Image: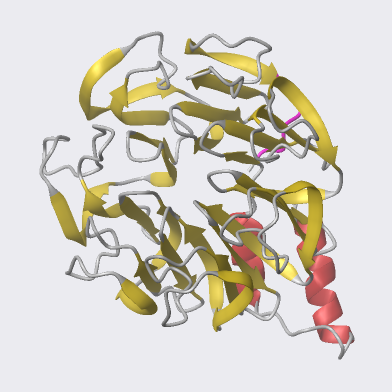
Amino acid sequence: MKKWWMSILLTGCICLGAVPAISKETAMAAEEDYSSVAAGLISTSVIKEDGSLWTWGTNDTNQLSKVDRKVSIATPQKVMDDVISVSAGGFHTTALKKDGSLWAWGNNYSGALGDGTTINREKPVKIMEDVISVSAGGANTAVIKEDGSLWIWGGNAYGQIGDGTKENRIKPVKIMDHAIKVAVGYGCVAVIKDDGSLWTWGSNQHGQLGNGSYTDLSRPAKVMEDVRSVYADTYWIMAIKNDGTLWASGSDRSVLGGCGPYADGIWGYKGSHWTFEKVTSDVDAVAGGNGAYFAIIKTDGSLWMIGRNQQGQFGNGTINDKYITEPLKVADSVSGVESGWLHTVIIKKDGTLWTAGLNQNGQLGDGAYENKTVFVQIMEKARTY
């Protein structure tokens, strides 16, 4: 599905001197890092098998790329074609096309789109070329280019740009080289380099940077080795190591009353952890719901939930305002998962896309505005991970 594009890119790097060099590690990581589904706070985006991008949910700052910013859209609407990866911040959306061009639209108050302005965009705007990976979170966007360089822009209140300042950046700023994966949370950033080392910076109020302190950082700092995947949320950063173990650092409970990912036999509230601690094993992917809950896909394709289930976002037919402190299995044959504020989006291995949870802005995409406590199928032929 994705290998043909990377094969062409690698061949071009060998044969054409004008094409930027790309390492084998960077190419492989980029291919693994493509995302077929993205959840903003209260919106959803998905890529279908044919490369078309579809969006739905709230559109108050044009994050769905529709003209009327005051409406919510409760069914999937097509935005563009030839997309290989999508990522959403709080109220902006980014798309990576198969030609390596990056496009962005939606809220731009802090410069999250990277077009050199702070003007909201109702339609996709081309930002840069030669991109192989993108991550959007909060009011920031980060990309990795073909040469392994990392570029970031947007809000910078916590130093999350990583350039040593706290000034917002409305254009891309180069931060480092040798990057292969990036995850942007709400005020924090995590990057994996081609040697497997994990680097973090930005907001550290809850110890989410995992460096043994609660001090914000405006420059990248190395915190871990042997990492293959990383996820950044509002209150914690979670890393999957090469052996499939999941590690996390940050708060065990958010201001929303959520439940963090720490184990030690009891999955409950134990305050903040300022270094990475092992959570569980045999993990393929992880996603967090803005500090209220999080989801784990195990290597066997099973989906597990932890935290609060106050809007039915677990998708298991229940509502529970109390903390779910032990991993709860809710589905099988899951290929990918994304979490918005209080809604969950999954893609099954057969390419069907399902949603559950909060739906007051149509973010579930089922044509209604009623919450769902059981996963409902929205479409077929979604691109699988």
Q: Is residue 158 magenta?
A: no
Residue 77: image location, x then y, percent: 79, 28
Residue 58: image location, x then y, percent: 62, 29
Q: In the displayed structure, would residue 252 be above or below residue 23?
A: above
Residue found 33% across the figure and 40% down from its top? 291
Residue 137: image location, x then y, percent: 51, 52
Left or right? Give the position of 150 relative to 279: right
Q: In the displayed structure, would residue 51 be above or below residue 349?
A: below
Q: In the displayed structure, would residue 31 be above or below residue 42?
A: below
Q: Residue furthest bottom?
A: 17
For the question of whether residue 245 can be seen, the reply is: no
Q: Is residue 383 magenta?
A: yes
Is residue 261 or residue 201 the one in the foreground?
201
* Number of dots carrying numbers: 0
Left or right? Give the position of 100 relative to 113: right
Q: Main secondary structure of the magenta part?
A: loop
Quarter of the image where one finds residue 112? bottom right
Is residue 225 or residue 191 the one in the foreground?
191
For the question of whether residue 364 can be seen, the reply is: yes
Residue found 44% across the figure and 54% down from its top? 185
Magenta part of the chain: 379-384
Residue 101: image location, x then y, percent: 80, 63
Q: In the displayed structure, would residue 81 be above or below residue 118?
A: above
Quarter of the image where one finds residue 365? top right
Residue found 27% across the figure and 63% down from its top? 204
Asked which colour scheme the image uses, the reply is secondary structure
Which quarter of the rendered picture does the C terminus lie within?
Answer: top right
